[in-house]
Image (tube, rainbow, N blue to C red):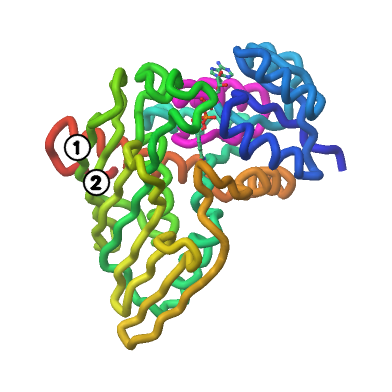
């Protein structure tokens, strides 16, 4: 079977740690192009993996005609690049947040449909072993209904992650549009929707810039979520957890509590009201300092090979983004926002 010819657009950190190595390790993929306006970044990978380096993604699409692309660029570019790639007949894996408005997300989904290509969003939290295990436990029914929850994602900020460090686009509003909420909050809105197999119905949010200097994007937010099932909980995103990362979720349920990512060795802990305690060692949650294989790339490749809906569809990405956009609306209006 011919290999899937993949181009990676944006050669920064997420490409370095996840997309490029995971494509390179997938036997069904040939890496054919790398794009970055800082051309040395693209050239470095072209040398390493073969394929051509480009500074301009439109030129790359026209010349290379890839079967699929990864869009790993600043947030504000996701929609236009994904739509152009779909119109060029390429399947699209776009990083989160998939877009910076609901209208953009809708247009991306339409473009993929119109061109008969798959659109997947890089919500890797769903693939992390502790989250997979936690969902299995929930589905087993031992905990009963989820009543309330908290889910949080905080780290010291993208200056320690982005290829451009403190000069990163992550801090520039025209390119990022959103700060910690678009970077981390959207991971957790996606996780909670997926894990609870539920949708968010209402959001209240406090979103602000508390400590990062010289930026207009948010560095902290605390949100209240009401789910369609009636469960209520909190979602927190922060770029100012200077003394380490928190990527944990706790679900308080009818029959007990499940703690996910709260303990370094026992990633999932289930404590039942009858006194039983189950501890599951299932592998770590990926952190900025410790990158685990995401599983996202293999899932994208599988959807292309089997011509099936990707594990995280455009519609999923859109629903998870909507929750975050509602939190900004709540902050701006001082109101609870219904997610419609
Ligand atoms: N799934 C995850 O866990 C995760 C983690 C980190 C980042 N991300 C997402 O990945 C995307 C990229 O983030 P990053 O951390 O790699 O950022 P980064 O700053 O490390 O790299 C971004 C790269 O994009 C390049 N770029 C800018 N404009 C471009 C253009 N027009 N064409 C091609 N390349 C262009 C920059 O030169 C830079 O090399 C963001 O949307 C971010 O939210 C996802």
Residue 189 position, x and y percent, is 37, 48
Query: Which mark identifies residue 223?
Result: 2
Q: Quadrant of the N terminus?
A: top right
Asked whether 191 or 91 is in front, the reply is 191
Query: Residue at label 1?
Result: 330
Asked whether 118 or 287 is in front, the reply is 287
Among all residues in the image, which is located at the extreme left?
Answer: 334
Q: Is residue 195 left or right of residue 45?
A: left
Alpha carbon distance from label 1 to label 2: 9 Å
| Residue for point 26% across, 53% down | 234
Label 1: state its secondary structure.
helix
Residue 309 visible in image: no
Residue 184 counted in the magenta span = no
Residue 76 counted in the magenta span = yes
Write down the region rendered in magenta: 73-98
Dots 1, 2 in contact, CB < 8 A: yes
| Residue for point 49% across, 32% down | 161
């Amino acid at each position: 079977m011919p290999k899937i010819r993949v181009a990676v657009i944006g050669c920064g950190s997420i490409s370095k740690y996840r997309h490029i190595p995971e494509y390179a390790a997938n036997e069904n993929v040939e890496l054919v192009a790398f794009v970055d306006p800082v051309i040395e970044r693209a050239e470095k990978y072209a040398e390493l993996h073969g394929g051509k380096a480009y500074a301009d993604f439109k030129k790359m699409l026209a010349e290379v005609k890839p079967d699929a692309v990864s869009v790993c660029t600043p947030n504000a570019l996701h929609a236009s690049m994904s739509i152009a790639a779909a119109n060029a007949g390429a399947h699209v894996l776009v990083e989160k947040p998939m877009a910076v408005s609901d209208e953009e997300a809708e247009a991306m989904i339409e473009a993929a449909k119109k061109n008969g290509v798959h659109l997947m969003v890089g919500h890797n939290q769903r693939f992390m072993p502790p989250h997979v295990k936690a969902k299995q436990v929930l589905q087993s029914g031992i905990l009963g209904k989820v009543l309330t929850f908290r889910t949080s994602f905080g780290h010291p900020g993208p200056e320690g992650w982005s290829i451009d460090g403190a000069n990163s686009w992550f801090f520039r509003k025209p390119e990022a549009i959103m700060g910690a909420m678009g970077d981390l909050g959207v991971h957790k809105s996606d996780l909670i929707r997926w894990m609870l197999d539920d949708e968010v119905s209402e959001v209240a949010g406090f979103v602000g810039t508390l400590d990062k200097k010289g930026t207009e994007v948010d560095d902290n937010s605390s949100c209240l979520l009401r789910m369609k099932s009636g469960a209520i909980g909190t979602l927190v995103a922060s770029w100012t957890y200077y003394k380490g990362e928190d990527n944990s979720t706790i679900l308080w349920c009818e029959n007990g509590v499940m703690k996910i990512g709260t303990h370094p060795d026992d990633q999932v802990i289930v404590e039942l009201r009858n006194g039983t305690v189950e501890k599951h060692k299932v592998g770590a949650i990926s952190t900025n300092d410790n990158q685990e294989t995401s599983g996202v790339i293999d899932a994208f490749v599988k959807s292309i090979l089997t011509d099936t809906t990707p594990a995280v569809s455009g519609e999923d990405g859109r629903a998870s983004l909507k929750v975050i956009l509602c939190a900004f609306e709540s902050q701006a209006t001082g109101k609870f926002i219904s997610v419609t």
